[in-house]
Amino acid sequence: MFNDITVGPITVHMYGIMIAIGYMMALAMSCYRGKKREMDDDVIWGIYLCAIIGGAIGTRLLYYIVEIPHIIEDPSILWDFKNGYVVYGGIIGGILASYVYCHKEKVVFLEYFDLVMPAVSLAQGIGRIGCLFAGCCYGRETDAWYGIVFQNSGYAPNGVRLIPTQIISSVGDFFICAVLLWYASKKPQTGRVASMYLILYGVGRFAVEFLRNDYRGSFGPFSTSQLISVGIVAIGVAMYVLMPKVSEKKTVKAEEKE
């Protein structure tokens, strides 16, 4: 695979291009679906801007947390921005920033949370294609026919057949997107589409982590991302179970006011 494309004095990176395409496709999907639901287009744009900023901060902050022991030994890691971005940090940071924005705008966060999460899965699937070009997030060595070999990667070991974890993750993200869109069409209680995302992505990520071989931090036999996945799934299950009760309480309060 290749990551750099050079045209004259200009060099572009396929990883960055795929991330940008993912963001644009996700925004377009959210705006299209939001318009059909008569949701505020300006709020959707605001959420995405906040998600980008919060996500960028989150990816770096979680990396610092995971790398504390190494940072103590070598503080220069703090300003090495070529490497060191954790996807889960981006997800968490993006969600928190979006929540703050929705609270400020006095709109129902869970409604927009439900709206954008299928699109987030789409963006993640496209972004993982960027990982494939770059060779990051690579898998363990394998002799299987489906293994891939990198030749010019600055991340994955070159000339070695590896499990294509980037492709597996990408296909999984696209599958989650399709499931969420289908589920959303059934008009479930507010918050349940988002909770399904947390459950499906958490389970999928936990499983794929067993196939990866890049350094991601570890606690015993599990990677940092697997531990976070457990928490994400637990939150998703709790949301899924509690949403009907929350909706019921709101309905009762509304009837009492009338």
Image (cartoon, rainbow, N blue to C red):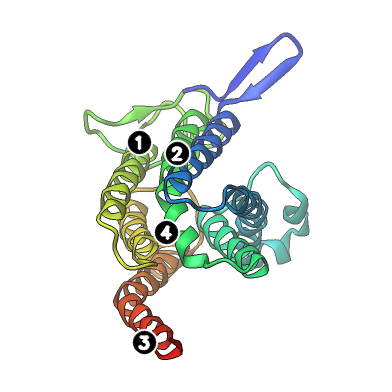
User: Label 3, on which residue?
Assistant: 252
Q: Is residue 165 left or right of residue 9?
A: left
Q: Secondary structure at mark 1?
A: helix
Report the residue at 67% width, 57% height from top.
57
Tell me the kind of residue under disc 2: Arg
Which residue in the rendered view is the most extreme toward the bottom? 256
Report the residue at 29% width, 44% height from top.
178
CB within 8 Å, label 1 to label 2: yes
Which of the numbered marks, if any, corresponds to residue 90?
none
Within 10 Å of the Cα at label 1, are there few (<14), some (14-19), or many (20+) other Cα atoms?
Answer: some
CA–CA distance in space, label 4 to label 3: 23 Å
2 or 3: mark nearer the eye = 3
Report the residue at 29% width, 31% height from top.
147
CA–CA distance in space, label 1 to label 2: 7 Å
Q: Secondary structure at mark 2?
A: helix
User: Label 4, on which residue?
Assistant: 114
Q: Please say whether residue 213 is visible from this viewpoint.
A: no
Quarter-of-image position of residue 232: bottom left
Tell me the kind of residue under disc 3: Val
- Nearest to the observer: residue 38 or residue 227: 38
Q: Please say whether residue 218 is visible from this viewpoint.
A: yes
Tell me the kind of residue under disc 4: Asp
CA–CA distance in space, label 2 to label 3: 44 Å
In the image, residue 222 above or below residue 139: below
**Does label 1 or label 4 sit earlier along the sequence?**
4
**Does label 4 or label 3 sit earlier along the sequence?**
4
1 or 3: mark nearer the eye = 3
- Nearest to the observer: residue 107 or residue 194: 107
User: Label 2, on which residue?
Assistant: 128
Q: Is residue 141 left or right of residue 135?
A: left
User: Label 1, on which residue?
Assistant: 167
How far from the left and from the top, in percent, is residue 166? 39, 39
